[in-house]
Image (cartoon, rainbow, N blue to C red):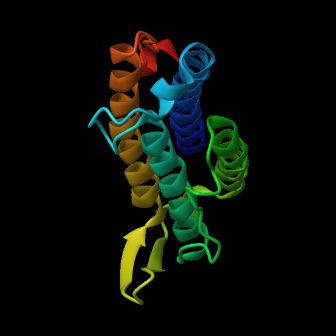
Amino acid sequence: MFYKDTVRSTVGYHFWANERIKKKAFELIASDPDGYFENLGVGHGSLHQTLYHMVEAEYVWLGLIKQGMTPSLTLDIEELKSLTDLEKVWKKVEAEYLQYFDRIDEKAFAEIVNTTDPNGIVTPIPRWRMLQHVLYHSAQHRAEAALILTHLGFSPGDLDFIYY
C-alpha cells in the first residue's frame, strides 16, 4: 500500500503544482497577453515556451515509461500556440499518467525498461527512475515558470509539497 500511496501522492502533487502555475498564467494572459510570450531569458525564454517544454517532456516520457519508446506523434509548438492549446494536451497527458500508475503494481514499477531514443540508442532504465526524472525535470521548469510569473506580478505562491 505504501507504494501506491506514495506514487499517487507524488504524482498528484506534481499535477496540483502545475495547475497552480497554469492558473496564474491564465490570469497573466487576461491582464497582459503579450507578457505570456515575452522572452525574459528564463527557462526556455518565454512562459509559453517553458510550459510547452514541460508538457512535451511529460508526453515523451510517458511513452518511454509505458512502452520504452518515444511517441510516434510529436507535439509541435507551432500547433500549440496558446495556453488553452497546451492545457488540452496536458489534461490528456495527466489522465494517462494517473490511469497508468494506478493500474500497475509495485513489480511493474520496479521493472527495468529498455528505452529507445529517436536515434535508436537503447538504454535500460527502471520505470520508477523515469517517473522520478519526469517529476524533478518538471519541478525545475515549474520553478522557472514561477519566477517568470512572479517577475510579471502573478506569483503562484507557495508550491511546497506540504501545502498539497
Residue 107 visible in this rendered orientation of the protein: no
In the image, residue 143 sits, relative to residue 103, either above or below, namely above
121 lies left or right of 154: left
Q: Is residue 128 visible?
A: yes
Please name whichever residue, 56 or 12, is drawn nearer the observer in this view of the structure. Answer: 56
Residue 36 % position (x, y)? 49, 29
Where does residue 141 sit, x and y in percent of width and height? 37, 39
65 relative to 81, above or below: below
Considering every residue shown, the one lying at the far bottom of the view is 120
Residue at 39%, 58% in the rendered image: 129
Identified at 54% across, 42% down, the residue is 7
Residue drawn at point x = 68 percent, y = 56 percent: 100
When the figure is inspected, residue 120 is found, relative to residue 110, above or below; the finding is below
Question: Considering depth in this image, is 107 or 55 the residue closer to the camera?
Answer: 55
Q: Residue 95, position in %: x, y?
A: 72, 46
Residue lying farthest to the front in this orientation? 34
Residue drawn where x is 60% and y is 42% of the image: 4
Where's the N terminus, which quadrant?
top right
Res 157 quadrant in image:
top left
Residue 68 image position (x, y, % from top left): 53, 76
* Lateral position of residue 4 relative to residue 143, left or right: right
Name which quarter of the figure residue 140 lies in.
top left
| Of the pair 159 and 24, the residue shown nearer to us | 24
**Number of marks present in the image shown:** 0
